[in-house]
Amino acid sequence: MARSSWTALALVLASQLALLTRTILAAPPEHGRPVFNHSMAAPSFVYCLVPGQFGVTPEMFRARGGIQLLPDSIYTPISTNPRRTIRGLYRHPLGWRLYRIAASPNMIPRGGGESHGYSHSAVGGIPWTQVQAVTYFAEGTNYLPDLTWVANAEYDARWEGFGLGSHQPLLSVHPYVPEDRDMRAFAMAFMDSLVGEENSGLEAERRALLDELLGWTLRREFPVFVPGEAPSQPSTILGRVDWRRVRIPAELQQLLATGLANAATCAAAMLALDKTKRRPPRRRHVESSISTLVTLVLRWT
């Protein structure tokens, strides 16, 4: 009987300790400001994998202003080991898109350690100007050099002056569930300190640049990015076509499947289509290579 009483008491104390710990971590202190770590790793590129079945193309991310995979979360998962992330992925008709992104100090180690290459989370999402390139593939592969990358014309190379951020215990309680206002308050305090004088790891000029790139002080909202222009209809359609069914070289199929096709790629695809047996009628007047290719694909596939 005594032993069971001690067991019950131990369980009660353990639960109260857990509750107290969570309260301390999940609520901003009444006195003083929360303290964050501001060491930063060397500049690098990180990755974000988006399944085609999500129905989101690069042009749609561009129109939104950036990448945020979980609408109810301020965290976007980041991979620092792309080979592990894409290895063994099942084959899917809609394929996969892998985004290559310049690292930044608002990307902090995730709680629980690495899983399938995902080791960090981007607080506030990923601005579109931070995306350096995107590639498309139909199934997992171990051969990263075989992937064809398409550069993002709106990428801002100034991001390359920064690196991944350090572990933040105050933001690691439950990073992949909808946050309550307390957790969001901590995240906002973290962003304030990241671009403020508390960040002694960066000199004032670099803090100002980071603030400009993130657009934080100007808005102080999550996600950190603002919507851009709506995607054009041709670009949206191009990003949703199953290019494996189109009779063009495999390299062109992969380039077009990224959803960031440029005029030169579209012109090359039109030329390839024009050489097939299912020759489409020529048009004398077209507004652009992209619009023409959309017309051809919709009619001849």
Image: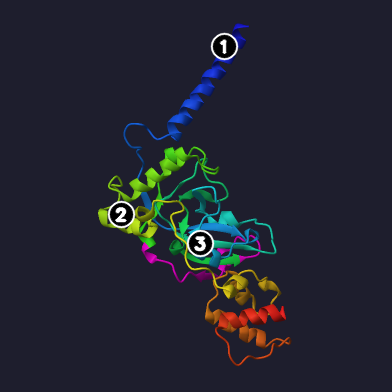
User: Identity of the amino acid at label 2?
Assistant: Arg
The residue beneath circle 3 is 64
Alpha-carbon distance for marks 3 and 2?
25 Å
The circle on residue 207 is 2
Residue 33: image location, x then y, percent: 33, 37
The circle on residue 6 is 1
Find numbered disc 3 in the image and state the secondary structure of the residue it sits on: helix
Relative side of 215 to 206, left or right? right
Q: Earlier in the sequence, mark 3 or mark 2?
A: 3
Q: Image point 37% across, 43% down: which residue?
A: 189
- When asked about the image quadrant of residue 139, the answer is bottom right
Relative side of 82 to 27, left or right? right
Eye-nearest disc, 3 or 1: 3
Alpha-carbon distance for marks 3 and 1?
56 Å
The region drawn magenta spans: 137-158
Quadrant position of the C terminus in the picture? bottom right
